[in-house]
Image: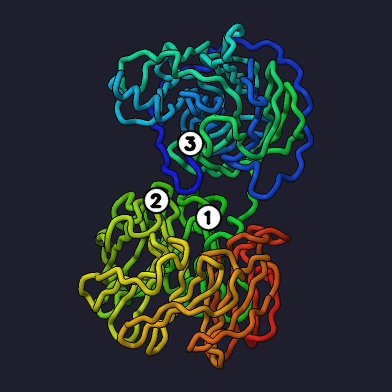
Amino acid sequence: MLGKGSGSPMIGRREFLQGTSWLALQTLSAGGARAADAAPQAERAPPPDALASNHNYYLYGGGGPIRGLIVTLDVTEEIFAPDGFSIQLNGYGPSGASCVWQQYIVGVSRDPARPLTLEWMIENWPSKELHEKLVRTANMKDHNDLFNVHARAYSPLPTFAAPGGRLPAGHRIRWELLGDANDPDGLIIGATFSFTDNRGRAWSSGPRKILDFDYNHTNVRVTREALAALTAFELNIVGFTNGLYVFIESGAGTIAYEASTPMTPQFQQPKTVSGQGLFTAETSNIRYGQLDAAPSKKVVQTFRAVRTPKFQPGGPLALAPHLGPDAAGLFAISVEGKLGGYALPVNGRGRELAGAGPRGVAKPGSAVAALPPGGPKEPAGLITVDQEGQLVAFAIDRGGGVSGPAEAGPKAITGWGAPLAASRQFGAGQTDLFVVDKKGQLKVIWRKDGGAWSGPANIGPEEFTAKFAHLAAGRLGKGDRTGVFAIDKQGSLAVFRAEKDGPWMGPQTIGEAGFAPAGAPIVVFEGEERTFVFLVDKHGQPHVAVAESDGGFGAPKPIGPKDIAAAGAPLAVVRRTRAPQFALFLVDRKGLLTLIAVDRDGQADKPKPLGPIALPGNKKSIVAARPFGDRDAIDVYAIGDGGPHDGEAVRFRSDDGEAWRGPELVTS
């Protein structure tokens, strides 16, 4: 799959490795002796947020074409991936090329009941100008790729003496990109894929020439204008297809990159290549070894499947206050793609829970929301959006057990991992779940008395806010009135409201346009008479807006200094038993968890730093709770971001709201 930088649409690739034919291992030819490999360069710790999954080095040709490229992947420790995976050589041409992105892919089958099968695929992508021309001149459908060619269109696929989902140690996969040595432009004209097993038996696709393909959805042969040189590329070991995340249980190996022209490893995409901001959308838990920055005609890199960090550092998490009779629950999506979490008893040490549901149900870092209990037929629960945009719910039983997932509503009403907000609809006897789709449309699904989910119903206009915006929901003022809050596309705080089981009305804007980043996080606190809404504006300054008992709002008021946090930073709020009434928590620009005490009128004490919790400048999701209702003991939870607890669930704790300790593991 093709992805682009934040905010850009994803372009889906058709599924492959489905319904493949099988070829006996005996049909593989005997392989010759392998050439000795250069020793891999030392694998040093990669920089944060780099060299993992769908972000490897760009191997750059210095502005000219990379010629004679051969990439060889050797498996040194069996790769175990029950859900299958793909290995993608993703390439970029010179700036202005008509073919902006090139993909040369090997897919590893995933059915353990059948033999291991490997498939190759070539899928290249046009510039906007070439695509528009082909729609006019070749009757190409309004589709994004130039062509999408699979091995099974040419011959049966090779099989190996191993079950699907396992690529044993000693196996080798080789890509050779083809070109004409006399071509001054260095165009890539095709590729040869070769597979060798750990017994030395080999199979080759033979040379597959791009000019022998047809343009996608046409009977028109590909022409030279669809070719491009390779001026930079990266190799990614990622999910199967269609943007999927895959958790690879184990495995390691080396990748050798060889060319007749020098290549230089770069962290950032070179500015002189085509397809600026494009990358593959599939992801995994693979990490790549660090390389020296010197140009070379041969570079060898290591790779390994990792189980750390356990959760996405600084990522979203949910606090479920009703985890059995005497505990709360803390939940996030783990590196395995499971719902993972902890039971947090009122007294004593936190206890890790076994992951609920299958592996890969959601991508790590996906948002999770707690569902409030709705009576004996509707227990408390949790909900997230799976990899295919399906809302899935987990139920919490009376003993604190978690089961699921079960589908909630129709498929694909939003995108994977979208933020969610849940609330009882007061006076209507139902639970509502709110989400924003990729068009910025606010949607709601609902259920009554534990029945099936209904909806979705649209609330307000399309493109009301940023796609997959953050939401907050709760009682609005006093009585049976429910409010849903978001920052709209104009940067205004906005609210929708429903009286009992009446229709949703709005949006009503609160304050000025340009106030906060579109889709920024919001926290709602329900008081006995009034509702308090907290958020951080575009200047990094926290604000509060107050709804009186009749639901009428005043404009947001500042409750702390400007630039204390990143614009639109996440925050958490708990109510105190004494003045000032609220304890507001956020992560400041230095990465410190910071407390701001606020009274009912918005008057704030001086910010109080509590300790390091994130890398400087990073946004950080946090949740907070009072474990005891009769005193100001407060816990603040987060997923560690950097430091000794990177990717682990951590807690700051105060027994009296004044003295604090942390960060510490929640199981400490």
Q: Above or below — where is 224 with respect to 130? A: above
Which residue lies at the image location 67% right of the left edge and 28% below the top edge? 255
Which residue lies at the image location 37% right of the left edge and 76% below the top edge? 474
Q: Nearer the viewer, residue 414 or 98?
A: 98
Q: Residues within 10 Å of mark 1 (few under 14, many from 20)?
A: some
- Give the residue type that dot 3 points to: Phe
Q: Nearer the viewer, mark 1 or mark 3?
A: 1
Secondary element type, mark 1:
loop
- Find the distance from the CA under tag 3 to the CA under tag 2: 18 Å
Tag 3 residue = 240
Q: Above or below — where is 608 with respect to 355? A: below
Q: Nearer the viewer, mark 3 or mark 2?
A: 2
Q: Nearer the viewer, residue 348 or 639?
A: 639
Tag 1 residue = 365
Given contact means CB atoms under 8 Å apart, are the residues at marks 3 and 2 in contact? Answer: no
Q: Nearer the viewer, residue 439 or 137?
A: 137
